[in-house]
Amino acid sequence: MQYRPHEYQVYAKDFIKAHPVAAVLLDMGLGKTSICLTALEELLRDEFEIRRILVVAPLRVARDTWPDEIRKWDHLNGLSFSVAVGTEAERLEALRKKADICIINRENVQWLIEKSGIRFDFDTLVLDELSSFKNHQTKRFKSLMKVRHQVKRVIGLTGTPSSNGLMDLWAEYRLLDMGERLGRYLTRYRLQYFQPDKRNGQVVFSYKPLPGAEDAIYQRIGDITISMRSTDFLKMPEKLVSDYVVHLSDSEMKAYKDMRDNLILENKEITASNSGILAGKLSQMANGAVYGDEGDVVQIHSRKLDALEDIIESASGKSLLLAYWFRHDKDRITEKLRSLGVEFRDLDSTQSIRMWNRGELQVGLIHPASAGHGLNLQEGGSTIVWYGLTWSLELYQQTNARLWRQGQRSGTVVIQHIVTKGTIDERILKVLQSKERVQDSLIEAVKAELGGVHEN
């Protein structure tokens, strides 16, 4: 297929080429993979500035999206690539190929650098979903830092750089510029830009930005950062967000409140030792079942399953993308779909994704943590139903962007949450909305405006 880039895509491509260190914060659906590949192709073939490229991406994005994009566009046909996923033998075979681009999933980064025995000879590094490296204590982060000095070009791609707040940015930019802009140490970054928020005596649970800190941080990173919103440059489909509210019976609500108030569900061996576990328990209960202390599943209600049946019926055969969170949710959903005679698949393989995009499935099951990034699912449907919610803004936005993106054939994308009234579901929605405001501040602060672009 011939590549006819939008003006904003040309600008973003040129920005990557002009900046040896580039943070490319492109909203979902703007085509960041093709933009990045075009820049790499020109740097490799036309300008001879780079020699070998390592792309680190989520598993399914590494396995499917990057290879598909290279094969898709005519101007990229000259690029050779290998995909280092699968068994160790398969990964080693891919790494030994003399390819321009080696694509590996982020879970195998430590293996590549510390255990594979393959010399790290990449001069260009692409981090697809830079937000995957927001935790400096992970093995993948530490491993990459060991070889970061060997890389002369690094490109960070993401649509959600600070999904949980500005604290996320330190590790991401530490990996990009080795601490030049936000400092080499997290403690100093925290002292300079934040103050304790929630605490218990000397124990600090969270931090909030000092007055003026957000602008100061954006000023520091602005010279290597480009940010664009899909709604600024694309004619995006209309997005309709709605809640399908279900109500618990008195006895079901009593069981829920007993757990919330007393950390125990009467007559069941279920406990919550801390607030994090309790939040998980309450989310499970809002969905209809909860894991007991022995790993058994205690059924609470079927309100969301009933709502799902209603939604499927009202869809009149239209395909639905269904997001779930807990394993027992998936088990009960699967049982329900089978009883209804609905054609469905887990969208966890190349084959099932192709079936979805060909319109062969009435329901596609998706887990945000494993399939929220990079997958192109917009050809198969325009409605996503959240059976259970996630606290992660990043996963929430990225999962919605599987349908609400460029290339969506429908004029309207529907995002529907099944929400249990009077439960933690309502709180999760509010938290996602408040986090989105922090995210929006960053995007707006470094947004590139075509025709009036300036660098801080």
Image: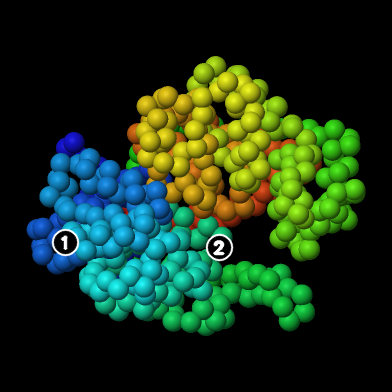
**Given the image, on which type of amino acid does mark 1 rest?**
Lys
Q: Residues within 10 Å of mark 1 (few under 14, many from 20)?
A: few
Q: Quadrant of the N terminus?
A: top left
Q: How many marks?
A: 2
Mark identifier at residue 165: 2
Question: From where the camera sits, is residue 241 visible?
Answer: no
Residue at the (74%, 39%) spot, across then down: 288
Q: Nearer the viewer, residue 268 or 206?
A: 268
Q: Is residue 299 visible?
A: yes
Cα gap from disc 1 to disc 2, whole angstroms: 41 Å
- Give the percent coordinates (x, y) of residue 378: 40, 34
Q: Is residue 381 left or right of residue 390?
A: left
The quarter of the picture where residue 196 lies is bottom right
Which badge, 1 or 2, is on the more N-terminal residue?
1
Residue corresponding to mark 1 = 98
The mark closer to the camera, 1 or 2, is 1
